Image: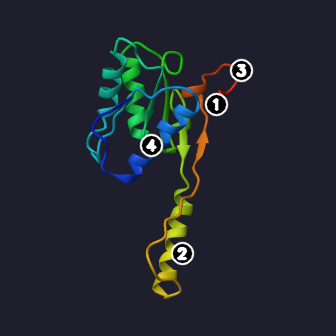
Amino acid sequence: GIVASVSPLSCIQERIVSFREKVEEYGAEAVYVRAVGPKEDDRDFGRRAAHSLLDLPHRPTALFSTDAPGAVSILRGIRERGLCCPGDVAVATFDDDVYAPYLETPLTSVSWPAFEIGREAARLLLKRVRSEVSGPPQRILLPPTLIHRESTLGTRRGAEPVQPR
Protein backbone atom coordinates (compact mmCIF):
# COMPACT_ATOMS: atom_id res chain seq x y z
CA GLY A 1 0.00 0.00 0.00
CA ILE A 2 0.89 3.63 -0.33
CA VAL A 3 0.89 6.01 2.61
CA ALA A 4 0.90 9.68 1.61
CA SER A 5 1.10 12.60 4.07
CA VAL A 6 0.03 11.08 7.39
CA SER A 7 -1.39 13.34 10.07
CA PRO A 8 0.80 14.13 13.08
CA LEU A 9 -2.21 13.55 15.37
CA SER A 10 -1.82 10.23 17.19
CA CYS A 11 -5.58 9.58 17.19
CA ILE A 12 -5.68 9.83 13.38
CA GLN A 13 -2.62 7.60 13.08
CA GLU A 14 -4.29 5.03 15.34
CA ARG A 15 -7.45 5.12 13.21
CA ILE A 16 -5.43 4.49 10.04
CA VAL A 17 -3.44 1.64 11.61
CA SER A 18 -6.62 0.02 12.93
CA PHE A 19 -8.29 0.41 9.54
CA ARG A 20 -5.37 -1.24 7.74
CA GLU A 21 -5.26 -4.11 10.27
CA LYS A 22 -8.99 -4.84 9.90
CA VAL A 23 -8.89 -4.64 6.11
CA GLU A 24 -6.04 -7.16 6.05
CA GLU A 25 -7.82 -9.38 8.61
CA TYR A 26 -10.72 -9.67 6.16
CA GLY A 27 -8.42 -10.56 3.29
CA ALA A 28 -8.48 -7.28 1.38
CA GLU A 29 -5.67 -4.84 0.70
CA ALA A 30 -5.61 -1.16 1.57
CA VAL A 31 -3.77 0.18 -1.45
CA TYR A 32 -3.89 3.85 -0.61
CA VAL A 33 -4.09 5.65 2.70
CA ARG A 34 -3.98 9.41 2.90
CA ALA A 35 -4.65 11.68 5.83
CA VAL A 36 -4.33 15.37 6.49
CA GLY A 37 -3.65 17.28 9.68
CA PRO A 38 -6.20 19.24 11.65
CA LYS A 39 -7.31 21.56 8.83
CA GLU A 40 -10.81 22.44 9.95
CA ASP A 41 -11.16 24.89 7.06
CA ASP A 42 -10.56 22.22 4.41
CA ARG A 43 -13.91 20.40 4.33
CA ASP A 44 -13.51 19.91 0.59
CA PHE A 45 -10.54 17.56 1.03
CA GLY A 46 -12.70 14.41 1.01
CA ARG A 47 -14.34 15.39 -2.28
CA ARG A 48 -11.00 16.11 -3.94
CA ALA A 49 -9.48 12.90 -2.55
CA ALA A 50 -12.48 10.89 -3.78
CA HIS A 51 -12.09 12.39 -7.25
CA SER A 52 -8.39 11.49 -7.41
CA LEU A 53 -9.02 7.93 -6.20
CA LEU A 54 -12.10 7.35 -8.37
CA ASP A 55 -10.18 8.55 -11.43
CA LEU A 56 -7.55 5.81 -11.01
CA PRO A 57 -7.54 3.08 -13.68
CA HIS A 58 -8.51 0.53 -11.00
CA ARG A 59 -10.90 2.52 -8.88
CA PRO A 60 -11.34 1.50 -5.25
CA THR A 61 -14.38 -0.44 -4.11
CA ALA A 62 -14.45 1.29 -0.72
CA LEU A 63 -13.29 4.52 0.88
CA PHE A 64 -12.70 5.22 4.58
CA SER A 65 -12.62 8.62 6.23
CA THR A 66 -11.10 9.35 9.62
CA ASP A 67 -13.94 11.78 10.38
CA ALA A 68 -17.60 12.22 9.49
CA PRO A 69 -17.33 15.60 7.71
CA GLY A 70 -14.69 14.07 5.44
CA ALA A 71 -17.00 11.15 4.68
CA VAL A 72 -19.83 13.51 3.74
CA SER A 73 -17.43 15.26 1.37
CA ILE A 74 -16.42 11.86 -0.06
CA LEU A 75 -20.09 11.04 -0.72
CA ARG A 76 -20.38 14.26 -2.70
CA GLY A 77 -17.27 13.38 -4.71
CA ILE A 78 -18.73 9.97 -5.53
CA ARG A 79 -21.97 11.55 -6.82
CA GLU A 80 -20.00 14.10 -8.87
CA ARG A 81 -18.27 11.23 -10.67
CA GLY A 82 -21.67 9.76 -11.58
CA LEU A 83 -21.25 6.85 -9.19
CA CYS A 84 -23.40 5.69 -6.30
CA CYS A 85 -22.71 4.53 -2.77
CA PRO A 86 -22.62 1.67 -1.92
CA GLY A 87 -23.40 0.18 -5.36
CA ASP A 88 -20.16 1.42 -6.93
CA VAL A 89 -18.14 2.49 -3.89
CA ALA A 90 -18.75 1.76 -0.21
CA VAL A 91 -17.95 4.44 2.39
CA ALA A 92 -17.23 4.12 6.11
CA THR A 93 -16.10 6.69 8.63
CA PHE A 94 -14.69 7.07 12.08
CA ASP A 95 -17.05 9.31 14.07
CA ASP A 96 -20.72 8.55 14.30
CA ASP A 97 -21.88 12.12 13.95
CA VAL A 98 -25.52 12.90 14.80
CA TYR A 99 -26.41 13.33 11.13
CA ALA A 100 -24.77 10.07 9.90
CA PRO A 101 -27.99 8.00 10.00
CA TYR A 102 -30.02 10.78 8.32
CA LEU A 103 -28.01 11.34 5.15
CA GLU A 104 -29.37 10.27 1.77
CA THR A 105 -26.98 7.33 2.13
CA PRO A 106 -26.73 6.65 5.87
CA LEU A 107 -23.05 6.31 6.83
CA THR A 108 -21.51 3.20 8.34
CA SER A 109 -19.59 4.62 11.28
CA VAL A 110 -17.26 3.77 14.11
CA SER A 111 -18.78 5.29 17.23
CA TRP A 112 -16.44 6.14 20.05
CA PRO A 113 -17.69 6.59 23.62
CA ALA A 114 -17.08 10.34 23.99
CA PHE A 115 -19.15 10.74 27.15
CA GLU A 116 -17.42 7.82 28.85
CA ILE A 117 -14.01 9.12 27.79
CA GLY A 118 -14.78 12.49 29.40
CA ARG A 119 -16.13 10.87 32.55
CA GLU A 120 -13.07 8.61 32.89
CA ALA A 121 -10.68 11.52 32.27
CA ALA A 122 -12.43 13.59 34.97
CA ARG A 123 -12.33 10.66 37.41
CA LEU A 124 -8.61 10.14 36.86
CA LEU A 125 -7.90 13.88 37.13
CA LEU A 126 -9.75 14.12 40.45
CA LYS A 127 -7.84 11.11 41.81
CA ARG A 128 -4.56 12.79 40.85
CA VAL A 129 -5.61 16.16 42.35
CA ARG A 130 -6.56 14.37 45.59
CA SER A 131 -3.17 12.59 45.55
CA GLU A 132 -4.92 9.21 45.43
CA VAL A 133 -2.74 8.24 42.49
CA SER A 134 0.76 9.26 41.38
CA GLY A 135 3.26 8.24 38.77
CA PRO A 136 3.12 8.45 34.99
CA PRO A 137 -0.17 9.14 33.22
CA GLN A 138 -2.39 6.14 32.58
CA ARG A 139 -3.49 5.18 29.10
CA ILE A 140 -6.98 3.73 29.03
CA LEU A 141 -8.65 2.64 25.80
CA LEU A 142 -12.43 2.41 25.73
CA PRO A 143 -13.79 0.17 22.95
CA PRO A 144 -15.51 1.73 19.94
CA THR A 145 -18.62 0.30 18.26
CA LEU A 146 -19.09 -0.32 14.54
CA ILE A 147 -22.53 0.80 13.35
CA HIS A 148 -23.45 -0.82 10.01
CA ARG A 149 -25.57 1.37 7.73
CA GLU A 150 -26.38 1.59 4.01
CA SER A 151 -23.09 3.20 2.90
CA THR A 152 -21.45 -0.22 3.17
CA LEU A 153 -24.32 -2.67 3.36
CA GLY A 154 -26.71 -1.21 0.84
CA THR A 155 -30.36 -2.05 1.11
CA ARG A 156 -30.17 -5.69 0.01
CA ARG A 157 -32.03 -8.01 2.32
CA GLY A 158 -30.21 -11.09 3.52
CA ALA A 159 -26.73 -9.77 2.73
CA GLU A 160 -24.19 -11.93 4.52
CA PRO A 161 -21.41 -10.13 6.40
CA VAL A 162 -17.86 -11.00 5.38
CA GLN A 163 -16.04 -12.99 8.05
CA PRO A 164 -12.38 -12.40 9.00
CA ARG A 165 -9.76 -14.91 7.86
Residue with the mark numbered 4: 17
> Dot 4: what SS?
helix
- The residue closer to the viewer here, 22 or 115, is 22
Q: Relative to 6, is 109 on the left or the right?
A: right
Residue at image coords 53%, 16%:
87
> Dot 3: what SS?
loop
Residue at image coords 54%, 37%:
22
Query: Between disc 1 and disc 4, whose residue precedes?
Result: 4
Query: Type of residue at label 2?
Result: Arg
Given this view, does label 1 or label 3 mark the residue nearer the observer? Answer: 1
Q: Quadrant of the N terminus?
A: top left
Residue 107 in sight here: no
User: CA separation, marks 4 and 3?
Assistant: 32 Å
Query: Between disc 2 and disc 4, whose residue precedes?
Result: 4
Residue with the mark numbered 1: 165
Given this view, does label 1 or label 2 mark the residue nearer the observer? Answer: 1
Q: Position of residue 29 (x, y in %)?
A: 48, 26
> Dot 2: what SS?
helix
Residue with the mark numbered 3: 157
